Amino acid sequence: MHIVVCVKQVPDPEAAFSQFKVDEQAKKVVPAPGLKQVMSPFDEQAVEAALRLRDAGADIRLTAITMGSDAARNVLKHGLAMGADAGVLLSDPAFENADGYATAVTLAAAIRKLGTCDLVLAGRQAADWDAGVVGSGLGELLGLPVITFAQDVKVEGGSVRVERVLDDGTEVVEAALPAVVTVSNELGEARKPNLRETMRAARKPVTAWSAADLGLPREKIGAAGARRVIERLFVPAKESHCEFIDGSPREQAARLAQRLREAKLI
Amino acid sequence: MSGAPSILVIAELDEGAPDKHTRELLGLARSLAQACGGTVSAALLAAEDAGAAEALIAHGADRVFFAAHAGLAGYHGEAWVAAAAEICREAAPAVVLACHSACGADFAPRLAFRLDTMVATGCIEVAYEGGRLAATRPCYGGNARETVSIRTAPAILTVRPGSHDALAPDASRQGEVTRLAPQIGAAAQRVKVLERRREAADGVRLEDARVIVAGGRGLNGPDGFRVLEELAAALGGAVGASRVPCDLEWCPRSWQIGLTGKTVRPELYIAVGISGAGHHMAGCGNAKAIVAVNTDPEAAIFKDASFGVVGNYQQIVPALTEAVRRLGPR
């Protein structure tokens, strides 16, 4: 079974807020010096979901695919070190400043070019724009059923069975393969690559494709193909006005209750 | 299509009636329609209409497109996408508004691709700016906001709860109901629902709670939630959580508040052992007042809080519960 997992390179979302800067003129996030670029955690969990299928005995071939600059090779390497078998880097200046639409168009073309694919996995959203558009878009563009927000993924006899997260519980759904599944954080922690796998990963193949390789016209990709226009990007202003309440725990509790009552909050 | 642009709200129902979030979207749609000289439509996707169309009109819709099909009972993403796409072809809206719920966040992106347009998800502010519809949404884990426009039509937006107030229902409002019989063929039934497990909320639902007591990593384990439950009970509120306790299964997943969980807007939000990361604050930052209890005086949560208590929650929260009980009802 061939599984394709879509991964994205993002500025480390665990980094301290103080390292987070926005250039409002350029409408871009400015990575602080030394800020790590990592695989988006939801995508890492999508890789994990595929590897759990292998752990459960499924015979899978796992291809990790990313669209980004040459530096995005690092997230492919991370995916390979986790256990993916091959990487595909979609890199071309023409891909830059894409929105979720143009990204899905690009990834869909690459997945078609890869040939047979039984299951496409992606994170529920990327940890930079938090949009949650690309996975669903891939399903529509490839004509495949889409199952979003998976917390458990199983494959049995040509079908995928997914436990997915709802607002007030979960549901179990099933679809015949091929299908697209987006993975939510409820899946649980992704494995860390060990040294042996990291060494092996260096010998695994990474293919690089450009827009021409995918046969995509310029107007469909990157900024030209984007339908979402960023008008502004900013860090919301916070005026700190916290009233700290001192004393022993008992005094703090009593004073807080009193203040909340005065403010008619309780 | 008439000249005036139409704003289409895709309704979600709660026991047959438009839910609170849908009513808020109708209020938002009315203010947008006023700004652009347009009209408000609602899409009702259901097996039957038990008064929902009337309620949608009373809450602000000028016209209801009712897609009636047995396959639309409950929520089935593929059937909803197919039916909503048919309504959009019929109604030709300029803007489509959907709830940023587990349903809306599931079907709206697919609807966008189906209609060859684009979606902005999880919006918190929507307004016309110089004739152009602009939607503001949290991004980068809640650290930043982007204001975006969409250059294809219709612009599809999923909107977080609490972004706009619902209008008071007006039973005298008149509207037109157009009934459609959507085609829901095999291609819209590829995903089968085998089982649904609802986590029954005992007491107050998070979305409706006036007071929420939420716990984070700082609780150090599931037992901490028992302490929070006591306080929530004394306040007549509900208990929520940040992402970490849900991922560690210290509490039910449905308690999660934040970018990938629920968005709430209570009057009082008591955050216990929550550091205040952007992705959590994206779900509760609109609370009227935030109280933070944390051992770390440098925790980011204090920047968002109106009242701060630095200390050990195991001592402070039970004492607070007692103090609240002593104060008695308001």
Image (cartoon, coloured by chain):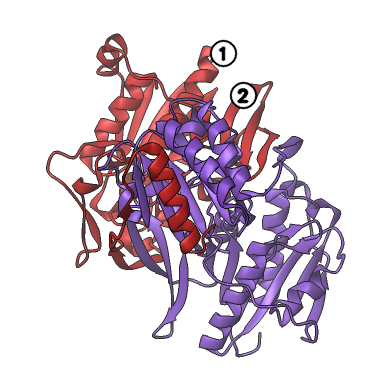
Chain colours: A red, B purple
Left or right: A89 as drawn, with respect to B76:
left
Left or right: A145 as drawn, with respect to A202:
right
Are discs 2 and 1 located on one and the same chain? yes
Label 1 marks a residue whose chain is: A
Q: Is residue B205 visible?
A: yes
- Which residue has dot 2 on it? A154
Residue B165, percent across and down? 58, 72
Q: Which residue is depicted at the point 15% across and 46% down?
A: A32
Q: Is residue A107 above or below residue B92?
A: above
Contact (CB < 8 A) between labels 2 and 1? yes
Describe the element under mark 2 as helix, strand or loop: strand
Q: Residues within 10 Å of mark 1 (few under 14, many from 20)?
A: few
Q: Is residue A81 above or below residue A133?
A: above
Q: Quadrant of residue A195?
A: top left
Question: Nearest the camera: B239 or B157?
Answer: B239
Q: Give the residue at the far top of this rendering.
A: A196
Q: Quadrant of residue A197?
A: top left
Residue B170, percent across and down? 75, 82
Question: Nearest the camera: B137 or A140?
Answer: B137
Q: CA distance from mark 2 to mark 1?
A: 9 Å
Left or right: A210 as drawn, with respect to B80:
left
Q: Is residue B45 above or below residue B56?
A: above
Amino acid of disc 1: Ala
Label 2 marks a residue whose chain is: A
Q: Is residue B238 visible?
A: no
Counting the numbered discs, the total is 2
- Which residue has dot 1 on it? A56
Amino acid of disc 2: Lys
Q: Which residue is depicted at the point 53% across and 28% down?
A: B250
Placement of the N terminus of chain B among the 4 image quadrants = bottom right
